[in-house]
Structure formats: C-alpha cells, structure tokens
Image: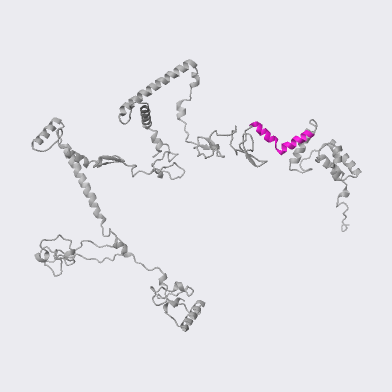
Amino acid sequence: MASSSAVGKLSREEFRRQKDLDAARKAGTAPAALDEEGRPINPHIPQYISQAPWYLDTGAPSLSHQRRPFDDRSTDKLDNWYDRGAKAGPAAKKYRKGACENCGAMTHKKQDCLERPRKKGAKYSNKDIKADEIIHEVAAGFDAKRDRWSGYDPAEHKKIYEEYEAIEAARQKLREEEIDNQTTTDLAAVRKVAKAGKKEGKEADPDFGSSDEEDADDDKYADAADAVGQKLDTKTRITVRNLRIREDTAKYLMNLDPESAYYDPKTRSMRDAPMKNVPPEDAKFAGDNFFRFSGEAPEVQQLQLFAWQAAARGNDVHLNANPTQGQLLHHEFKEKKEMMKDINKVSILAKYGGEEYLERVPRELINGQTENYVEYSRTGQVIKGKERAKARSKYPEDEALVYTNNHTDVWGSWYDISSSTWGYACCHSIIHISYCAGEAGKEAALASTAQALLASSSVAEAEPSAQSDEAKARIEQNYSKKRVGEGDVSLDKDRLAEAISEEKKRKARGDKDDDRFSKKRKGLQSGSHDVTEEEYEAYRITRRNAEDPMANYVDSEAS
C-alpha cells in the first residue's frame, strides 16, 4: 500500500499485481519498499498515512510528508549582522560613469544617497568624491527581517548616560562657583546692584532683582532634592507620593506561608506581623498596627478625635487649619480631666472608704506579660495564651448567651446512648425546644430508663428488708453477659441444701423440668422465675447418670 502513491490510475491487472505485492510485503516474503533516502517503509502503515497528498507527491514512495521539515534558523540570529559604514578602500579621484551624482560613490544612486545634497554635485564639480561602501549580503529570516532593533549597537546608548553626567557635573560646578563668588549678604548692597541694573534699562524685581533665573535654577536641582518615596514635578510643583519604594521587599513576600498575616491587595495593607517569631523591634516589617500604635501616632489620633468631638459640640476647633490651637486646647482639656478625676476619687473615698481595695498589680508585671504566646493541650484545648476568635455561623445558638426556654446549653450538646438521640446537656431532654428542668430533668430521665424500671419493679415485689440485696444481685445477673454457672460462683450452704431437697422431691413426684415453674407452683411459692446458682448446682448434683446418653456406651473392641 505504501507504493500506491507512486502510480496513477491502474488497470485491473496492475491493481491485482499491486495488491499481491502488498500482501507479500506484509507477509515478509517480498522486500519492503524503499523511500527516497533508501530507508525501508513499513508495509503495515495504512494507506491514508503512507499516501502523500497531491501537492506533496514526489512520484516515488516516501514518508517525508509525515516528518517535520528541516528548518535552518541560523539566519534568524540577531548577532548575524554586518558592519555599518565600512568603506571599500580609498576614494576615487575623478567621477566615474554610473556613480552617484551627489557624492560620487559607485554603490548607490542619487535618490538613495545619504550625504547632504550639494549645490553642485560631484558629477559636475569632480571634487570630494566619497569612497564606495561595502555591501553585505545578509540572509535574514522571517524574524530577523522584522526585528526593529536589528543592527543596533547597544554601546551607542552609553553616550546618553555620559552626556547626562557631563551636564550634571557642569551644573554642579557652576552652582559652586556662584556660591564662592558671593562675597556679601547685605540686603542694601543687593538692592543697590538691582537699582543700577534697572537704570541700564533691564527689568528687575524691586526687592531682589530678577526671580526668573532663580526659579529656573531651582527647577534644575529640584529632581536632585527628591525625598525617599517622593518625586517633585517641576512643571506643576506638586509632590507625588509613591505607594512604596521599588527597592523594598513587598509585604506579601516576607512570609510565603498562606496561614500567616492577611494581606489586602486593594489597600496594600498588612495589619498583623508576617513573622510572629521575630520581635517587633528587630523585625524588618512588624505590621501596620505596630506603626499605627507606636511613636507619636496614638497622640495624633487622640488629638484628631478631640478636634472632631469639640467641633461636634459647637467649638471652633480644626486640627488642620490651626494645629497649635487644637494642641493647646487638648492639653488644657487633659489637665482639667485629670484634675476632675482626682477630685471625684478623693471625694468618693472620703465618703465611702475602701481605699485598700484599689490596690493593683505593679505595672511592671502587667507590662511584662504578652498574649501572643498560645499553648494547646493534646485534645486541642487552650492551656495558655489567647486563641484567635473563630468565625461564627449564621445560627442563633452560635451567638453568646442566646438560649431558649431556660436552657443553659444548646440543642445537640448531649447524646443519649440508650435511645440514640440528641438532646440538651443541661437537663438531658431529648425533645427539641422543650422547657429546661435542670437537675430534676436529669433525675427523671435516669429514672425512666428500662434498667431503672426493672430494678424498681423487682424491689417493690420483694421484701424490703430481706430480699433487697437479692433482687439487685438478680438484676445484675440478668443484665450481665455471664451465663449461669460461669465465672466466680459463691454458693450459700443453707440455700444449697434446701435446693437439693426440693429437687429430690420433684424427681420423686415425677414432675418434668418444664413443670418446675408452672402457674400452680408459682402460686404456691413466692419468688422469681430466675434460676439461681444454688438451684442449678442442685440440679447438676441430683441428675442421674442414666440421663447421660454416653452412660451405657461400651467399647466392644477394647473389651
């Protein structure tokens, strides 16, 4: 099938021979077809893969249309460029036919000449004939032909820096010379010079001469006087505050742990410290809250709050319009407040007493404590420190002190194992939105269990003096997982002898085992239907060996 692409329309006989040849190649009896490069073609390749399309068909069996074409991209390299402006030897002495009519070079025409257009060209003046340029044949690829920086020398950009540095050095030198030449600072002498210049017909300021030169000089050095994080626009004279210095590390890059302090990208603020194990005084960035509550920032906030409150009461106080007045009023307000506080304290203590209860822990101990350290137990409970407040849910039970119907715990705080239901832990009630009964509810819930009801019925039937302990033992025996006759058994000798005599009388009467606890016997005897350890032991002792199915077994072979 691989060679079918090399032929056109075949006759019936040629098609049959082609099919036989393909079958033989697949069976391995005929050699495989070879492509243009002499490599064998796998005969099991389907026809839709081995057959080349009409626009790539070479007339011979081949798989080159399925391979990636070889692409030599060496011509696209940016370094493969020529030397611009190279001249080919010395210039000619006379004009040559076919050369440029403007400069006399043979490598271009007049319309392509880059020299200054001459009033009389080299063709007519036969003077200053330029040398021929070296034309390089650069084979540029698709990317290289469209590269806007192809052939650009990066060393040319250094000239811009050198020119700028030279201008700045000249300005600085000129400024130093002006300061050195200034020999007097007397304002009268300066005014005298200004008046003399005015007499000569020059316009000047009445006080200090022309201010245009000073403004221009200030604009020259305004950029050099920029503060860190600020930039002065010399045209509008507006100081632009940058959000942060570009050389500083961003806040969100100081700790890459996603569980660390939260960073707000909209306001670019991080309130908490990104590194909790580093003291705030030694940290490179301790959070916005640290800077907000350190230094004189709290005092400025208190001053601003005082100005707002005073303005709300009708006083003419504005912190930005008159900061000195606001600060003096705030200082006076604090003094009066402390004075009134002391007067009230002294008067209350003098009237009611109790000064000994106002003693407190020394401030050194209070300030030495911190709540940043949190210690947890193995069960997840907080032992030391203060845990971060968790997000509350939308349910009212999650809010503090929101309980219904006198309950002190929420619904679902207690689980009843016997009924497999949820309830309240304060009263053990399994009814939702029920009224809380407190400890009485717990006792009622305990008394309503099945085990408590059985215990109460057994105690009521038995005599309270003689059979109370016996009933408890029987109840424990019924609810225990041990069977009768198992475990540690303690038998009463008197009750065992009585049980043996009763068992012998029953066997003498010929009663069956089922008639032992019939209604007739129950009416005659007062007691429980449960089998005691003594009765079981009496039955085992008095049982005859004839009842044993292996009692009459005799081994004939052994005898």
Magenta extent: 438-461
Looking at the image, residue 51 lies above or below residue 215: below
Locate residue 533, reporting x and y percent. 81, 40
Q: Residue at x 85, y 35 (%)?
A: 494
Locate residue 258, reporting x and y percent. 45, 45
Tell me the quarter of the picture where residue 180 sits.
Answer: top left
- Left or right: residue 192 versus residue 9 is left
Looking at the image, residue 437 lies above or below residue 338: below
- Which quadrant is home to the C terminus? bottom right
Locate residue 285, reporting x and y percent. 39, 39
From the image, give the main secondary structure of the stretch colored magenta.
helix
The verdict on residue 51 being magenta is no
Q: How is the image coloured?
A: one colour
Looking at the image, residue 155 lies above or below residue 270: below
- In front here: 223 or 450? 450
Locate residue 11, reporting x and y percent. 45, 83
Outermost top residue: 351
Outermost bottom residue: 13
- In front here: 126 or 352? 352
Outermost right residue: 508
Tell me the quarter of the picture where residue 408 sits.
Answer: top right
Q: Residue at x 25, y 66 (%)?
A: 137
- Left or right: residue 479 versus residue 403 is right
- In front here: 230 or 302? 302
> How many marks overall?
0
- Left or right: residue 533 versus residue 293 is right
